[in-house]
Amino acid sequence: MSSPYLPNTDADRRAMLQEIGVSSADELFQDVPQKFRNVQFKLPPPLSELELKGELRQLSDRNANLDDYACFLGAGYYRHFIPSVVGHIIGRSEFYTAYTPYQAEVSQGTLQTIYEFQSLVCQLTGMEVSNAGMYDGSTATAEAALIACRITKRNKVAVLTTVNPRHSEVVDTYVKAHSIPLETVEPDSVDLPSDCACLIVQQPNFFGYFEDIKTYTGKAHQVGALLIVIVDPISLGMFRPPGDYGADIVVAEGQALGNPISLGGPGLGIFACRKEYLRQMPGRIVGKAVDVDGRTGYVLTIATREQHIRRERATSNICTNEALVALAATVYLAALGKSGLRQVAELCYHKAYYAAEAIGKLKGYSLVFQQPFFKEFVVRCPTAPQQINQALFQKRIIGGLDISHIIDNGMLLCITEVNTKREIDRLVEILGAM
């Protein structure tokens, strides 16, 4: 069972097999039915580089290119304008190929960019500390729930039904492995038990509208539970940060900050919290210090190496950070600045209200919620959203998310600054014609 790509010799393999008590490699796979072992794949003959590039191009053309389609789909991943400077910076080889910055003496550039990212996240969310970035928004939420259980020494997690279902599902997967029950709570009847570790809310919520967060803050803190808030980072350009209304932990999906949708990934998990929870924070934290010569330096700090190399003793098994994606978010925020981010948020807000008002006037369509919203809203359609989306796609329009399983004939539409008035008017026109 030799391979030109593996350095192990026959003697090495015999020694390893003997150590684990089996006589051959085949014995390792005895639980796999014989018909599934060493299956001969029916692959086409090899192609030249020129032929292969042509075939891959044909496959790529089967995708809906967002440069050619008007897109009104959101629900977690969003299409926003990305300044060209973002690509120029993250495309530099020292960042593009950099890995874990364990050796601070040779990783100052990478460590500084992560430090700047953490600083910007704290300014954006109004929180005191941030980590170096996590896999995505949903895993950041799940890690926050586990942290809350360790801090409060309680084993019960509550999540509002208005939270993105994908986030709730990931949280459920995480806490279930720790035998921690996850309870769903309706927004109008939040009554937390005394043994609840945390309440997870989203602002704006999955349906796009804003909730009365102050009420949830009071309900959570009244029983000694932590308030975990999931935010849309773009919305913080014009709305109050969660640090202002009593959030204990803030998480977010940071893809919207300078990163393309890319078929759903990679994501960027934003994680920030109050200073007293610093040592419970998962992932990595970069600190700023001064060396013996008085020069500024950056280094991984606070977290022990058990976080990264000894899984059984770690408080979190997330052992890396999304450095390149976090760098894109850092460049995006720095390039836009405070006023630029506010302008993007205002464009999303006003365009979304323009679209919602126009669609709400169409016969058979109505807005499901009347609360203030940011860039997403739910429309009740006169027929199945799936049929409407199929018809829209034929017109080179990607419609909203079909949430009929939650709201009868409900469609969640998203409008961002890249959606032009012409695109919105055309959407309204086609919906009206249906």
Image (cartoon, grey):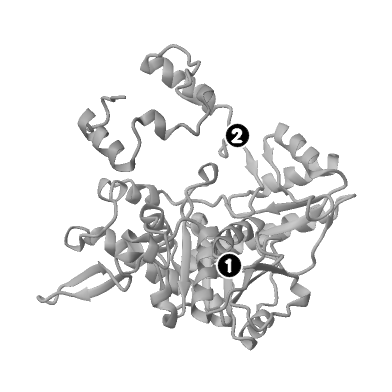
The outermost residue toward the left is 293
Tell me if residue 252 comes above or below residue 428 in the rendering: below
User: Could you tell me how far apart the alpha carbons at marks 1 and 2 are, in whole angstroms?
Assistant: 30 Å
Which residue in the rendered view is the most extreme toward the bottom? 222
> Residue 336 lies in what quarter of the image?
bottom left
Disc 1: CA contacts within 10 A as few (<14), some (14-19) or many (>=20)? many
In the image, what residue occupies the spot 56% across and 76% down? Answer: 242
Name the secondary structure under disc 2: loop
Can you see residue 132? Answer: no
Label 2 sits on residue? 64
Q: Secondary structure at mark 1?
A: strand
Q: Amino acid at mark 1?
A: Ile
Whichever of labels 1 and 2 marks the residue nearer the N terminus, that label is 2
Q: Position of residue 93 (x, y in %)?
A: 26, 45
The reply to whether callout 1 and callout 2 are in contact (CB within 8 Å) is no
Label 2: how many Cα within 10 Å (few below 14, some 14–19, many 20+): few
